[in-house]
Image (cartoon, grey):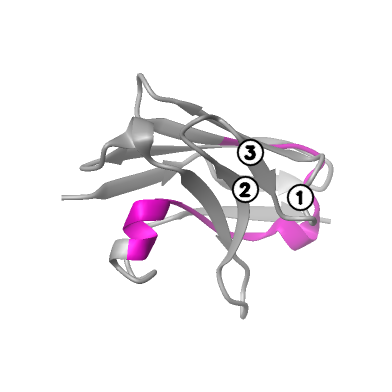
Amino acid sequence: QVQLVESGGGLVQAGGSLTLSCAASGISFSINAMGWYRQAPGKQRELVAHITSGHVTDYADSVTGRFTISRDNTKNTVYLQMNSLKPEDTGVYYCNADSVVALYDGDYWGQGTQVTVSS
């Protein structure tokens, strides 16, 4: 059974930093591309950062230069380092594997972790 457990969210002032973690189980983690997604209040979930099994990374324009995605295959964990946070970064952050998104047609997610950035 696939499990995705996000942690590390919280309340932070604008300009601050947070590091999110996502522990995955029930998948072949090392061969899976992973992504961090964000769902802001009243908006659809969006992909903000992505990392392939070969550690190639990609970012949404809105977070480029501020967020860094990384992974530790020995711990089956993907991270999102978020710097220079802005109020518009507020939302629930989820991680997922590309294979899980495809298999469940985007309907399988963990509980997410709330990030709130105050101005």
Residue extending furthest toward the top: 74
Q: Residue at x 67, y 59 (%)?
A: 90
Counting residues from the start of the chain, the first of labels 1 and 2 encountered is 2
Which of the 4 image quadrants contains residue 114? bottom right
Residue 50: in sight, yes or no? yes
- Residue 79 at x, y = what percent? 53, 34
Q: Is residue 82 left or right of residue 94?
A: right
Counting residues from the start of the chain, the first of labels 1 and 3 encountered is 3
Residue that badge 1 annotates: 63
Residue that badge 3 annotates: 57
Image disc number at residue 49: 2
Cα–Cα gap, marks 1 and 3: 13 Å
Q: Residue at x 54, y 50 (%)?
A: 36
Residues in magenta, as a range:
80-102
Indicate the secondary structure of the residue bearing disc 3. Answer: strand
Q: Residue at x 77, y 38 (%)?
A: 16
Indicate the secondary structure of the residue bearing disc 1. Answer: loop
Q: Given the image, on which type of amino acid does mark 3 rest?
A: Thr
Q: Report if the CB atoms under discs 3 and 2 are less than 8 Å apart.
A: yes
